Amino acid sequence: MCYHSRSMTAAGRIEELRAEALSAVASADTTGELESARVKYLGRSAELTEIKKSIRDLAPEDRKTVGAASNRATKEIEDALAGRLDRLSAAEREERLRSEALDVTLPGTPYPRGSLHPSLRIIDEVVDFFVGLGYRVAEGPEVETDYYNFTALNIPPGHPARTMQDTFFLDEGLVLRTHTSPVQIRTMLSQEPPVYVVCPGRTYRRDSDPTHTPMFNQIEGLAVDEGLSLSHLKGTLAAMARQVFGEGVKVRLRPSYFQFTEPSVELDVSCFNCGGADPNCKVCRGAGWLEMLGAGMVDPAVLEEVGYDSERYTGFAFGMGPDRMAMARYGIPDLRLFFEGDLRFLRQF
Ligand code: DAH
């Protein structure tokens, strides 16, 4: 074959390949198809590539024309590929954005609403009341040492008052706290007077019947300052009772006994349901009064134990059971319902 005709054949073939490639590029509908076209027409084993490699075998005068033609074709195909790629990727991005679009105006999936546990409602109200008076909230551990739970509260080892508490004993020297009163001790040891704290928390006793559960809540309160007396205690707790049970309720103090207070009292609230008038009242069972809490003036021995000057400072303390208060308020007959986690019960509040 003469060089002339070889070069003509090559140039003609380049022209055919160029046209084929451009139409393949133009008709590629995806970036994937476009890539196949690139490989087919410009890839390592593409025919055009082969032609370029064989240029050095051509007669010198043909090299120029075939080389120029193949370069032009290559450049044109590359430009077409780049242009098409821009258009296709823009379209694909559009499509992806469209298919992933979220309509933020659609209504959401409703999420079931919870409600506050009845004990927690009382705890919140009581704590809110005291925080409003300037009290601070203090907390302590549920696994407590024998010292904080008993000894520091004037209940020494071997004292009969210990057996009244149905204690869960853990390892040597540790108990599940039987009341929140140890938080009084921890608070006083960590700061100087004046002290005004409320201490809500879980407490534990070995007890289980309709009005006792092995775990129950308490709220402890402690005020230590100069010049505090029993009338401050009564005024404070009466105001709290009115807030939680209603403006109309009255309170009365009955003498009582606690190891860590002297004198000790129990505080009753007039029945918020019948006002003391209904002998068949379901809430007070005709008693007219509801027992609400234990309280008293902090025993000077307790103040001395934490290093407070009991000549200068006096204090009052109280401990109440928010679960019992919730039973009264909501007319719930069995305390055990509170801790079974039955949603049918909890949803009623
Ligand atoms: N800790 C007592 C109990 O669990 C309740 C109590 C009574 C707390 C008198 C006090 C208090 O702070 O002064 O039965």
Image (cartoon, rainbow, N blue to C red):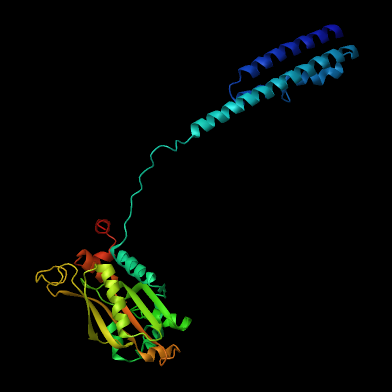
Residue 180 position, x and y percent, is: 35, 77
Nearest to the observer: residue 80 or residue 255: 255
Q: Quadrant of the N terminus?
A: top right
Along the viewing direction, whichever of 183 and 211 lies nearer the viewer: 183
Location of residue 21 in the rendering, given as x and y in whole percent from the top left corner: 68, 17
- The image position of residue 168, as x and y in percent, is 33, 79
Residue at left offset 32%, top offset 65%: 120
As displayed, is residue 308 above or below residue 127? below
Rendered position, 291 above or below 78: below
Answer with left or right where residue 197 lies relative to residue 63. left
Q: Give the total number of marks visible in the rendering.
A: 0
Using the rendered view, name the quadrant where residue 131 is placed. Answer: bottom left
Q: Quadrant of the C terminus?
A: bottom left
Image x and y of residue 75, in percent:
76, 20
Farthest residue in the left direction? 279
7 sits to left or right of 330: right
Does any portion of residue 214 appear in the rendered image?
A: no
**To which quarter of the image does residue 10 belong?**
top right
Q: In the rendered view, would you say 274 is above or below 40? A: below
Residue drawn at (75%, 13%), measured in percent from left and top? 14
Q: Residue at x 20, y 65 (%)?
A: 332
**Extreme residue in the right direction:** 60
Whether residue 344 is visible, yes or no, is: yes
The image quarter in which residue 16 lies: top right
